[in-house]
Amino acid sequence: MDPLDQRLTDAGRSWRQNQPEPPDLDRMLIALGRRRPGLFQGRLMYAFVAGLLLLAAVAVAPGVGSFLHQTQSPTPIQASPSPSSLPAEPSSSPQPTPGSPQPSPSAVAGDSETASDLVDRYEAALVAGNWQTAFNLLAPPSLTREAGLTSFSDERQAFFESVNGRYVIGSPAPATDWATYGPLVSGADRSRAWFFEVDYPALASNNAGYEQFVVAPDAGGTWRIWPVR
Amino acid sequence: MTMTSTLTVNLASATPEQFGAWTAPHLRAMSLLAARLSSDAERDDVVQEALIRAWTKRAQFDPQRGTPSAWLLAITADQARRARRGRRPLLGFLPGRVRPIDEELDLAHAITSLSSRQRIAVDCFYFVGLDVAETAAVMRCSQGTVKSTLSDARNRLRKLLEGRDGPA
C-alpha cells in the first residue's frame, strides 16, 4: 500500500475511535413526532391562504353574476395577468401546447414553456461549462446561489464531468408540495411556480443521478430557478 | 435485511419509530460525517436536522436509485454544509480530536490546504470510513470522479508533506 494511503487510513481509524457515541436516536425521534403537527399546520395554512386568494379572485372577477353561479361553472377561472406579473424574459413559444399540464388558476399562458426553456438554458450552460451563465439564472435567495459562484462552479464542474453532457428534462408540473421544498424557495411567486426533475442518464441508478428545481418568477417578475434537492 | 427491505417499501407511510429503525444502522456514519464536515459542537444538531429532512422527504427515497445509507449520508452532508455556511471552511475541516502529535498535526494541516472537493473526498473516504460508492453519493458525482479526486488529493498531500518532513 502507498505509505501516504496507509497514513491517511491510520489517521482516519484513529479519529473514528476517538469520536463519541452517536446521539440518542430515541430523543431525536421525539423531535420528528413534534414536527408532524407543525407540517400539518403548515399545509392547513397554505390551504387556507389559497382558499382566501381564490375567494378574492372570484369577488373581483369582472362579469361575475353571483358567487353561486361562478362555483357552478365547469370551466376554471383564469385570472387576467397584470403587466407587472408578466415574465421578464419572453418565452420562445408563448402559446400553450395541447397536452400541457393544467396550470394553477393564477398561472399565465405560456408559463410552463417559459419555465422549461429556462431549465434547458440552465442545463445547457452547465454542460458547456458556462458556470457564470448558469449561476445568473438561479434565484438570488436560493441556498445554492447564496453559497457563491466559486462554490457553485467547483461543485458543478465535478458533477458535470460525470454527466457526459447528457440530461433529460422531465415534464413540468405545477409546484404544490410546499411542505417539502417551501423553505428552499424563498421569494418565488408560488402561484406561478413549476416543478421539474432533470435526470442524468450517465448517473442512472444513483441517487445523485437527478436534480429537482422549482422555477417561478421572483419578486421582480424575472423567471428564476430554485434548486430544491 | 428483511426488516429493512420491508420498511423501505413502506417508508412513505412509516411511523417515526419505524423510520428510526430504518435509520438506526446508519446513525454512526451520519454522526461521523456530521462531525467531520461541520464540527463536534454542531454534530448533534446536524444529525437531528438531517433526520428531520429525511423524514419529511422520505416519500422521495427511491431504492432503485441507491441505498438508504447513501441517501441519508447525502442529506447529512447537505445539512453539514448549511451549518458550515457563514463561517470560513478551513477551521471547519480540522479534525475535532487530533492528538497532539506533530505527525498528525502536519497531516491535519496539510488536509486543510486541499481544495474543498478534495477535502470532502478525503474526509468521507479515509476519516468517516465510507466506501467509494457512498462517497460518490455524498459528493453527488460518479465513483470514477471520487477515485480521481482522491488520487489528486494524495498527490497534493504528498507534495505538502514532503516539504515538511521528507517523503510521506
Image: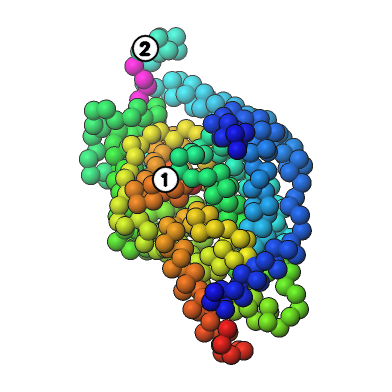
**Residue at label 2?**
A73
Q: Nearer the viewer, residue A23 or B39?
A: A23
Provide residue A211's location: percent of width, then percent of height. Answer: 42, 47
Q: Residue at x 39, y 42 (%)?
A: A197
Provide residue B138's location: percent of width, then percent of height. Answer: 53, 55
Residue B106 occupies quadrant: bottom right
Distance between the alpha carbons at the discs numbered 2 and 1: 46 Å
Q: Residues within 10 Å of mark 2 (few under 14, many from 20)?
A: few
Q: Quadrant of the N terminus of chain A?
A: bottom right
Residue A127 numbered tag: none
Q: Nearer the viewer, residue A7 or B36?
A: A7
**Residue at label 1?**
A205
User: Which is nearer the N-term, disc 2 or disc 1?
Assistant: 2
Q: SS of the residue at dot 1? A: loop
Dot 1 amino acid type: Ser
Provide residue A85's location: percent of width, then percent of height. Answer: 37, 40
